[in-house]
Image (spheres, helix red, strand yellow):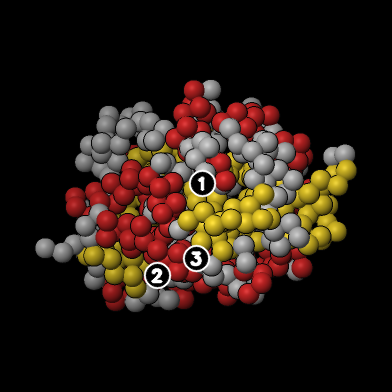
Amino acid sequence: MSNPRLIARLDIKMADLIKGIHLEGWRKIGNPWDFAKRYYDEGADELLYMDVVASLYDRNNLTDIVRKTAAEIFIPLCVGGGVRSLEDASNLLRAGADKIALNTAATKRPELIAELAQRFGSQCIVLSLEAKQIGDGKWEAYTDNGREKTGLDAVDWAVRGVELGAGEVLITSVDRDGTFKGFDLELIECISSRVSVPVIACGGLGAPEHMLEAFTDSGADAVAAARAIHTERTSLTALRQFGLHHQLPMRQI
Amino acid sequence: MTRTVVVADYGVGNLLSVCRAVEFGGGTPICSPDPDVLRSAERLVLPGVGAFGNGMQELIARGLAQAIREFTATGRPLLGICLGMQLLFDASEEFGPTDGLGLIPGAVSGLPDTDADGKRHKIPHIGWNTLTRPQDLADWNGTLLEETPTDASFYFVHSFSPRATNSADNLAFCTYNGRVFTAAVQHENIVGVQFHPEKSGPRGLALIERFITTS
């Protein structure tokens, strides 16, 4: 953690920003564009768009909002959900995405990570990991928003993904997602200490203290906030001020 | 008066953001893969992400490498961003030695995989970071970084970094876990920045606006 990032995550279903708990029970929250714009104005370091129904439709449906975002918002944008080929990735990048998050397709065919990394560069490829705890210090990788088991050990899979060329790992704890109970620090720490690339902690942020402990205790390089900021339980501004107050070397806005 | 900016399209990177940032800065972007358009540009931006070798291959295959050299010989302004900055140098060691455009003396090498204390750290260097001025540079007046406060952050994402042979070409450095690397260079009419101004919020947009209005 040397320049910790604060990422706003937007889970999008067709035209709506949604958010659930444990990646389930989604509720509509509003128009994703309004939220994206607000987060940019509040100083988000990065935006993350996840198409949560992409697997159902076999494609990513976010091209329009990606294009609009790239036209009006000047911070990095990562997009995931339903990316299964070089062509899918290329379309999103051409629409204005800076990074592509891979999950389902990569678990089925890990070489996809290497192919995309070779074509677009590792800095473009984020391994998106949905992890559920299955025992003491053990997590399994899931796909399709925590519905489908992969049989893969989450930590081993993260290491493999980085070896194949992923330039970042997004770690979403299915157990903590939407609960406001704080990040799964043990999970983040296990992965962060085993990989050479930055890791993003996701799932469980409910208060500024949770962000602080992710950075100082678990080796996270970035944290993603979703439900807590969508519902205004806290804000990006409050999170950043709290971090700076605790001497985290976060970006001064 | 319109101020046109040609953005070189050689198949790598997010050109849309660069073009929109140009519009925000009051310029008219012309995104083009055509060597003749590059040659006759008023000002040129060379963007890019990804691997050095692939980027250079694309520039050569499309006839753009020669067009960029001819453009810079006219004295008109060129801005290289990220990989586009690295390509301006003589060579890179990424995936084996590869020749670059040779417009700025120097070479590109990998960021050290350890911090200043020798402890392994995260590569790529991804995130927002501040700039420092070289000791022998009194101020940034008259450069693209004019009026940039020292606590202003810019967005970086890279694993490699160039080193200019002539220290006078250095415009700004950046420090990552105690490791200092080149963040911006200027060699005559050629400027290069390792960070992404088009992804660095209002501060980055101001830099692009300065490129359009002052050069």
Between B59 and A235, which is closer to the camera in this rendering?
Answer: A235
Q: Which residue is mark 1?
A: A230
Residue displayed at 22% across by 37% down: B141
Q: Which residue is mark 2?
A: B9
**Which comes before the other along the chain, label 1 or label 3?**
3
Residue beneath disc 3: A15
- Cα distance between the residues tagged 1 and 3: 16 Å
Badge 1 vs badge 3, beta-carbon distance below 8 Å: no
Amino acid at dot 3: Ala
Q: CA distance from mark 2 to mark 3?
A: 31 Å
Q: Position of residue A83 (x, y in %)?
A: 62, 68
Residue extending farthest to the top is A246
Residue located 28% across and 66% down the image:
B29
- Disc 2 sits on a residue from what chain? B
Mark 2 and 1 residues: CB-CB less than 8 Å, in contact? Answer: no
Query: x, y (%) of residue A12?
Result: 55, 60
